[in-house]
Image (spheres, rainbow, N blue to C red):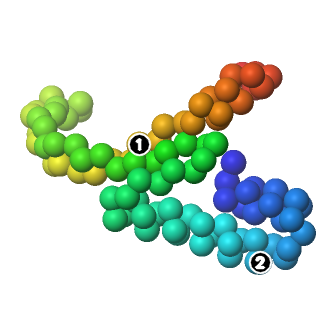
Amino acid sequence: MTKADIVDIVFEKVGYSKKDVAAVIEEVFESIKAELEKGEKVKISGFGNFTIRQKRARRGRNPQTGTEITIDERRVMTFKASQLLKKAINTSAPADA
């Protein structure tokens, strides 16, 4: 699913213009992104939690050459699905594989 797909779905359900719906969805994503950039936790009730974790620097290996490299410390985003989302995923019909 792409952002355009989300815009189309919301447009069909709400009835506002696609331009207005796209602007609202873009603002929602920008708000989430801004909070995560600040290191804040984003909790969407019934969907899940987005959090930022700090990973320490570590030694790694270049898979092509086998030489040791240092992987810099960095921040990573994690997502944990809510119980409602987990339940919805596990009770719906399986997707075609």
Q: Going by the image, does 40 lie left or right of 6?
A: left
Residue at left offset 68%, top offset 72%: 24
Q: Going by the image, does 62 lie left or right of 34?
A: left
Residue 37, image x and y in percent? 36, 63
Q: Which residue, as the protein is rendered here, is positioned at the far front?
A: 45
96 to 44, vertically: above or below: above
33 to 89, vertically: above or below: below
Residue at left offset 57%, top offset 50%: 44
Residue at left offset 76%, top offset 77%: 20
Residue 89's quadrant in the figure? Answer: top right
Residue 38, image x and y in percent? 34, 65
The residue that disc 1 covers is: 78
The front one of 66 and 51 is 51
10 to 20, vertically: above or below: above
Residue at left offset 48%, top offset 37%: 80
| Residue 96 visible in image | no
Q: Going by the image, does 44 lie left or right of 77?
A: right
Residue 46, image x and y in percent? 64, 42
Q: Residues within 10 Å of mark 1 (few under 14, many from 20)?
A: few
Query: Label 2's element?
Result: helix
The residue that disc 2 covers is: 19
